Amino acid sequence: MAASQASGNSCTAAASAAATRAVMVLSDVLKRADQRAGDLAGFADQSRARGVTCEQAYDSLGR
């Protein structure tokens, strides 16, 4: 009986360790995705600002 309980606990421990690793991997993926989204948002903001500046310069030529 004690051997049966010990083996049951080792399965639970192994499953817990696997779940912990999975959570760590998913956490890392989420962190990287969030960083990338921030980078892309920065590029988009910069591109928009440059586009607005370009439009204003172009519009001023016609006056």
Image (cartoon, helix red, strand yellow):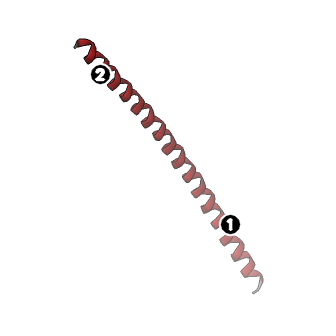
Pick out the residue farthest to the left: 1
| Picture quarter with the C terminus | bottom right
Q: Nearer the viewer, mark 1 or mark 2?
A: 2
- Residue 54 image-quadrant placement: bottom right
Type of amino acid at the residue the image marks with label 1: Arg
Secondary structure state at the residue bearing disc 1: helix
Per the rendering, the mark at residue 59 is: none
Q: Which x, y percent locates residue 9?
A: 29, 21
Secondary structure state at the residue bearing disc 2: helix
Q: Which residue, given by chain and number where applicable, does mark 1 sit on?
A: 50
Return the residue nearer the eye: 32 or 56: 32
Q: Which residue, given by chain and number where applicable, does mark 2 sit on?
A: 8
Image: 36 above or below 1: below
Image: 51 above or below 28: below
The residue lying at 70 percent from left, 76 percent from top is 55
- Residue 60 image-quadrant placement: bottom right
Dot 1 or dot 2, earlier in sequence:
2
The residue lying at 28 percent from left, 16 percent from top is 6
Q: Which x, y percent locates residue 56?
A: 69, 76
Pick out the residue farthest to the right: 61
| Picture quarter with the N terminus | top left
Return the residue nearer the eye: 33 or 44: 33
Q: Which x, y percent locates residue 18?
A: 42, 30
